[in-house]
Image (cartoon, rainbow, N blue to C red):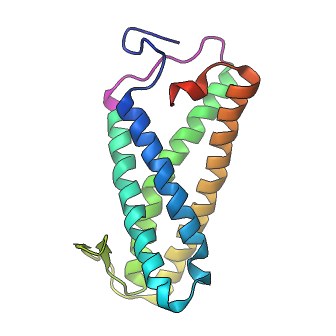
Amino acid sequence: MPDALHPDGRYSGVARGLHWLVVVLMLVVLPVGVVIEYVKEEVKLTFYAIHESLGFLILIVVLLRLSYRLFVQRPPPFPGLPAHLRIAGHAVHWALYALLIVQPVFGFLATNAWGFPLRWFGVIPIPSPLGKDEPVAKILSAVHETIGWTIVALLILHVGGTLYHHIVRRDGTLYRML
């Protein structure tokens, strides 16, 4: 639905750009994270560097996106949207925001606990708050992996909800973010 701030009914260009930047980064980070344990040892550290650097970038972009969302009005919801769909959509969005913030933090802490410092894109050293501690590293890695699979499930719900709006409800939800 259009309003004075959103005459075409869409999110702002900044909001759409940050959304799609996170999507592109996740299309790299998630598969790289899944295959790391299966790649040859001679390229494993490169895969970790890509996964960690882009994961840290996701954290920054999501924080920027969330900050922007708090200060810039979003387009109004579509009229007639049932409460259960509105609540489900909000729950999935906020769960994704929360997990996309805590996921890189757990990954970073796990990396530190395994004894590997993070050099963002191989250039910027990020100070390690933890020393090497293998028992803690195992726990942090398990939490990181669990959050990762939870994010995948939430992404399936998010994309499924978008397709439901686009194909079944035909209400323009997809268009708002394109």
Report the front residue among 170 and 75. Answer: 170
As for residue 3 lying within the magenta part, the answer is: no
As for residue 74 lying within the magenta part, the answer is: yes
Residue 1 image offset from top left, x and y in percent = 53, 12
Report the front residue among 178 and 86. Answer: 178
Identify which residue is drawn at 51% across, 30% down: 177
Is residue 158 positioned above or below 132 on the image?
above
On the image, which quarter does residue 56 sit in?
bottom left
Q: Which residues are magenta?
A: 70-81
Identify which residue is drawn at 55% across, 70% down: 33
Judge left or right: residue 64 versus residue 103. left
Identify which residue is drawn at 39% across, 26% down: 12
On the image, which quarter does residue 130 sit in?
bottom left
Identify which residue is drawn at 45% across, 49% down: 22
Report the front residue among 128 and 161. Answer: 161
Residue 133 image offset from top left, x and y in percent = 42, 88
Residue 13 image offset from top left, x and y in percent = 38, 30
Q: Is residue 28 visible?
A: yes
Residue 169 image offset from top left, x and y in percent = 72, 21
Is residue 78 positioned above or below 114 on the image?
above
**Which residue is most to the top?**
4
